Amino acid sequence: MPVLTPQYDAAVVIGRFQPVHNGHLHLLHHALERAATVIVVLGSAFHARNTKNPFTREERAAMIAGAMPPGQRERLRFVATRDYYDDRRWSAEVRRLVAAQTDPQARVLLVGHFKDASSYYLRHFPQWQLETLPRAGDIDATDIRNVWFEAEDLEVSLDVLDTMVPPSVRHYLRAWSLLPHYAALVEEHRQLRKYQAAWAAAPYPPVFTTVDAVIRAADHVLLVQRKGFPGRGLWAIPGGFLDQRERLMQAALRELAEETNLAVLDVTLEEALVDVKIFDHPDRSARGRTITHAYYFDLRLEHLPEVEAADDAAQAVWTPIANLAAMEASFFDDHFHILDTFLNLTGSQ
């Protein structure tokens, strides 16, 4: 059989790989035929585990490497990027990561598959040659996760996945299900299913409106630790759902008071308002389409006002801004991104 000469210096495959399945391997094998090196961009990295993204970037890289034969495995390079919920920032970061792995004059190929509307990101890299492949079988990572999280008998469920994932990934899922993360995510999956079922009878898919309050004082921000699902134990910005008869600002101040008992008058907070931004990415919340209005208040105080957790907050804590970047993987939904937008925690805006 003739040995194919790679036509490109590097090929790029972008995905979440949650988990790795045979469709992903189809893209990777094609990329390896076309280029000397394949750069695998692991998306949705650096954040807390959830039912959509249960595996860390390291775990996904291990799954991919374990599914590839020797000789091909060594030609893979792994890079990881966070969800910026901003196409411009995200695509610029992907280009930067790829450039760090290639020469300036490298011939780069982007290999992908247009699964649905969410695959529009493949059009964000006109400087690379794009090759799209047809779907390799009826395989969907969401279906795989649902089977895995809803398993009454794990071995039976893994049998169902035999045609969707390589044997090494099946073994990985079996071993991973023994970790404490699995039980917690199974419960979160159950709670989300229950939440979504409650809205199933609506005449159209609901769009929820929430509010969040970013409170800054003495180089700290006020965070709450979530008491219930989804996101039990994760850190979040104080906030919640808009009531029927509320204005948005009024709702933000109410939720702040209910969750933290912040010892600051509403009039003082209103005078400390610096900025308001809307966060409306369709995938920002696991609960469904949720649009939040985030209010940024800078109290410009040298001391930290008293707080006390209440309502659905397990803790209310003043946290040094300097510590937030290291906490990225402990935040609920896109709350780190909201903080980053106001405070420029990653230095990449």
Image (cartoon, rainbow, N blue to C red):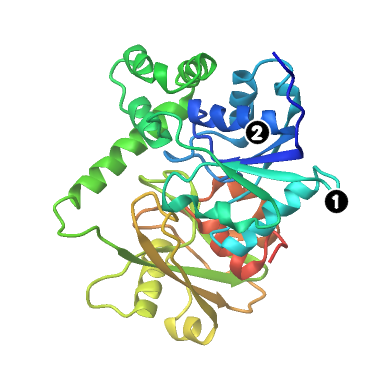
Relative vertical location of residue 131 with respect to residue 257 in this rendering, above or below: above
Which residue lies at the image location 20% right of the left edge and 53% below the top edge? 199
Secondary structure type for disc 2: helix
Q: Closer to the camera, 339 or 287? A: 287
On screen, residue 77 versus residue 283, left or right, reads right
Specify whether 117 is left or right of 344: left
The disc placed on residue 82 is none
Query: The residue under label 1 is which amino acid type?
Result: Pro
* 291 vs 143, nearest the viewer: 143
Horizontal arrangement in the rendering, residue 226 relative to residue 160 (left or right): right
**In this orientation, which residue lies closer to the viewer: 164 or 27?**
27
Where, by quadrant of the figure, is residue 348 drawn? bottom right
Residue 314 in view: no
Residue highlighted by disc 1: 104
Q: Quadrant of the C terminus?
A: bottom right
- Give the amino acid type for the residue marked by disc 2 in the picture: Ala
In the rendered image, which quarter contains the N terminus? top right
The vertical placement of 48 against 255, above or below, is: above
Q: Position of residue 51 (x, y in %)?
A: 42, 38
Residue 321, position as x, y percentages in the image:
66, 61
User: Which badge, 1 or 2, comes first in the chain's sequence?
Assistant: 2
Report helix, strand or loop for mark 1.
Answer: loop
In the depicted view, which residue is nearer to us: 310 or 233?
A: 233
The residue tagged 2 is: 31
Q: CA distance from mark 1 to mark 2?
A: 20 Å
**In x, y percent, where is residue 341?**
60, 67
